[in-house]
Amino acid sequence: MEKYIGEFLGTMVLIAFGTGFGSSISLKHALSKNMSPSFLTVIFAWGFAVMCGVYVAGFFETGGHLNPAVTIAFALGGLFDWSMVAGYIIAQILGAFTGAAIVVLHYYPHFQATTAEEGNSVGIFATGPAIPNTTFNFLSEVIATFFFIFVLLLMNTAGFAVGLAPVVVAFLVMAIGLSFGSTTGYAINPARDFGPRLAYALLPIPNKGGANWGYAWIPIVGPTVGATLAVFLFKALGMG
């Protein structure tokens, strides 16, 4: 149970920090909205959010997955017990939902002051495509997650010091974001997208827009496929 709690808390921190930043640059009267942050700022914000989440989960010795794609990949690669996969994924989704709910509570007056057209949109909490194209949006998530998981699997065998690993993972996430993130917002994590999207849809957020459920399957299925392909290559090369 302790490991599930660790995954819950780590994912909660990841999403609270990540979507908290999204709220601060999107909602009216939030001070950061006046800064006109660049895409690079967004990349760094999410990278640091991942780092903090992995450190929290690391206290509970969970492996710091925070991501169903990572959990599934490690299980497929023989690096994680299949009996714990479902529990990890449930904990990650619940943690993501809770992190988003905390952000809604924190910024509630700002949501009240902001209409959907002014920035009160699902984009604060979940990913979406710059150019809607089902095939290429799906491929973008597959490709980004493939590289993320493949490098992560190699890192897992490299034996980084425990205290250094979250920093390295954070820079990996930033590298993925810089290289592949501008097309779909690089979910590369089904829980990171589904949990906050569900929170946005269910919670009584004033003036909100739609949750764009028609797109929601892509950041779930795409990362799962990408992770699976990365494991197949990892094992085919005799690395696992």
Image (cartoon, rainbow, N blue to C red):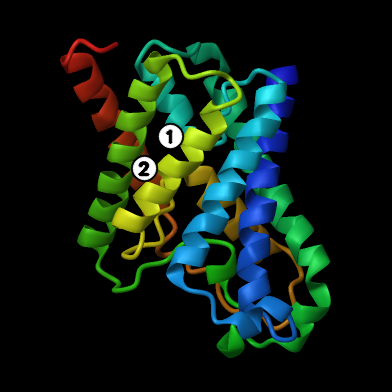
Residue 235 vs 134, above or below: the answer is above
Q: In the image, what residue type sits under mark 1?
A: Ala
Image mark for residue 223:
2
Q: Is residue 5 visible?
A: yes
21 lies left or right of 31: left
Q: Is residue 1 visible?
A: no
Residue 231 vs 157, above or below: the answer is below
Instruction: Indicate the position of residue 130 as horizontal and vertical percent values.
Output: 34, 72
Camera-side residue: 173 or 100?
A: 173
Identify the image quadrant of residue 218.
bottom left
Residue 6 vs 161, above or below: the answer is below
Camera-side residue: 141 or 182?
A: 182
Instruction: Indicate the position of residue 38 as horizontal and vertical percent values.
Output: 47, 73
- For marks 2 and 1, give the CA distance: 6 Å
- Which quadrant does the C terminus fall into? top left
Camera-side residue: 42 or 230?
A: 42
34 lies left or right of 211: right
Q: Which residue is mark 1?
A: 69
72 lies left or right of 36: left
Q: Residues within 10 Å of mark 2 (few under 14, many from 20)?
A: many
Q: In the image, what residue type sits under mark 2?
A: Pro
Give whichever of discs 2 and 1 has the lower sequence position: 1
> What's the residue at 64%, 81% (across, down)?
33
Disc 2 element: helix
